[in-house]
Structures are given as C-alpha cells and as structure tokens.
Image (tube, rainbow, N blue to C red):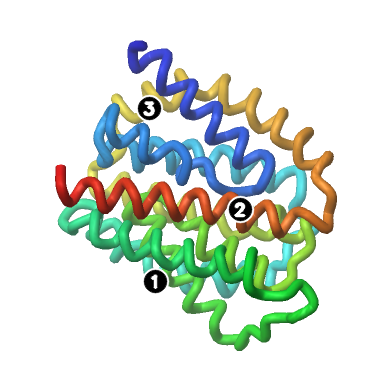
Amino acid sequence: MPNELLIPLIIFCGSLIYGTFGFGDALFAMPFLSVLIGIQTATPLMTLNGTTLAFLLFLKHYKAIDWKAAGKLIIASFCGVPIGIYFLKNGNETIAKILLGSIIILVSFYNLFIRKESRQVKMHPNLVYVFGFIAGVLGGAFNTGGPPIAIYGTLSGWSQLQFVSTLQGYFLPNDLFILSGQFISGLLNKTVFYYYLTGLPFLLIAVFLGNKLRSKIPVTKFNKYIFVLLLIIGIVFLTRSLLSLYA
C-alpha cells in the first residue's frame, strides 16, 4: 500500500484514539510513521495533527479545564521542550524509549492489578512540575508527551470530563510551542505539510467518531481504560526499542 493511502489510515486510527481518550494519537502513529517517513518527518507531522486535535477538543470542552493544573504543567513542559527538540536532532532515541516504555508499564500495571480502587494516591503538589517537565522533553523529542500527563491526571483523580478537557488546556499551548521550536529548527517543511493536508479529512472524521465513542464509556471505567491503553503503549514502546538494539 503506498504512503499516500497508508499514512492517512494511520492518522485516522491515531485521531480516533485521541478523540476517544483525549490523547494517544502520536503514541499509536509514531512507530508506524517513523518506519515509513523517518522520525524527523513523523514528529513534526504528528505535532501538527496533535495541535489540530487539541484545538478541536479545546473548543468543545474549554469550560471544564482545570486551568490551575494545566498552567503548572505548561510552565514545566516549556522548560523541557527545548531539551527534547535538541535530543530529536542529536540524541539516541532508543535509550529514551526503553526508559519511557518501562516506566509506563510499571505505573499502568500497578494501577490495574495492584492498587485497590479504594486506595487514593496522595500526590505531592510539586510533582505536577515533574510530570510537566518530562512531558515537555518527550513531546519535543518524539511528540509523545501524553503518558506523563495522563498518568498525572488519573492519579490526581480527575473526572472523565476534567481529564479530557484539562489535557487539551495543556496540549494546545504546548503543541504550539513545540511547533515554533520545530519551525526554528527547520523540521517543518513541504513534505510535512503535504502529509498533514492529505491526512486532515481523515483526522476530522476520526475525532467526530471518537467523541461519540467516549460518550458511551461508563464514567467509572474510564480511568481503567486509560491505564489499559497506557499499558499497551508501554509494551509496544519497550518491545520495539529492545528489538532495534539487535537490528
């Protein structure tokens, strides 16, 4: 299947995940797009897609955003983004992805199979800056800043609506900041915009369907589904990264 058909299909699937859970498009799409068009094209492409998705969900849910939490996450993330962009151009992505995958798996496994639902996790107020900084580094490097924010939101006890809406309050300004850094670094080019425009109709359809799917998810099951999604993401990240060491 040629890239002109395969890439929009990947974007559709990733956008459907995002429309349903409020994050996860790049985490699904980046492994496939990196193989097809290379990570230095895939990363800015998914940043453009993510900015569009965040803007659409922001317009729908902005009234429910926890701006206090989102503001702290944004400030910390802005400090991490330049490091991530530098890493994208000069670093070893395999080591970072092994670490990221391992952390996601451990946190997700704990919350799915060990922690009792009645046991509340006490989050130190300053941990918001740690999660935000890590998300900024990962967002700048691989456009995969979603897991740290998703983990923070679920551990903080956000409701389904608060989770989805506050993520957009974080993602939209953060993605715009990442885009500006990618533009300055010369990562945005005609090829990136071509793939973005050809995939845009599929993105719009997917985000509409994702909103419909989310409305059918029981509120009491939403956090569980988030950690299931994160666990799958972590396993894929770790497996692919380990295999690349022996390729």
Residue picked out by circle 3: 193
Dot 3 surroundings within 10 Å: few (below 14), some, or many (20 or more)?
A: some
The correct choice, above or below, for 146 with respect to 118 in the image is above
Dot 1 surroundings within 10 Å: few (below 14), some, or many (20 or more)?
A: some
| Residue at 51% across, 49% down | 232
Q: Where is residue 246 in the image (x, y as percent from the top left)?
A: 15, 48
- Type of the residue with mark 1: Cys
Which numbered disc flags the more N-terminal residue, 3 or 2?
A: 3
- Type of the residue with mark 3: Phe
Image depth: mark 1 or mark 2 in front: 2
Q: Where is residue 37 in the image (x, y as percent from the top left)?
A: 27, 29
Q: Is mark 1 on a helix, strand or loop?
A: helix
> What is the spatial separation of the Cα atoms under label 3 and label 2, in whole angstroms?
33 Å
Tally the numbered discs: 3
Query: Residue 165 or 92: which is nearer the viewer?
Result: 92
> What is the spatial separation of the Cα atoms under label 3 and label 1, in whole angstroms?
27 Å
| Residue at 35% across, 42% down | 43
Q: Which disc, if any, is residue 228?
A: 2
Image depth: mark 3 or mark 2 in front: 2
Which numbered disc flags the more N-terminal residue, 3 or 1?
A: 1
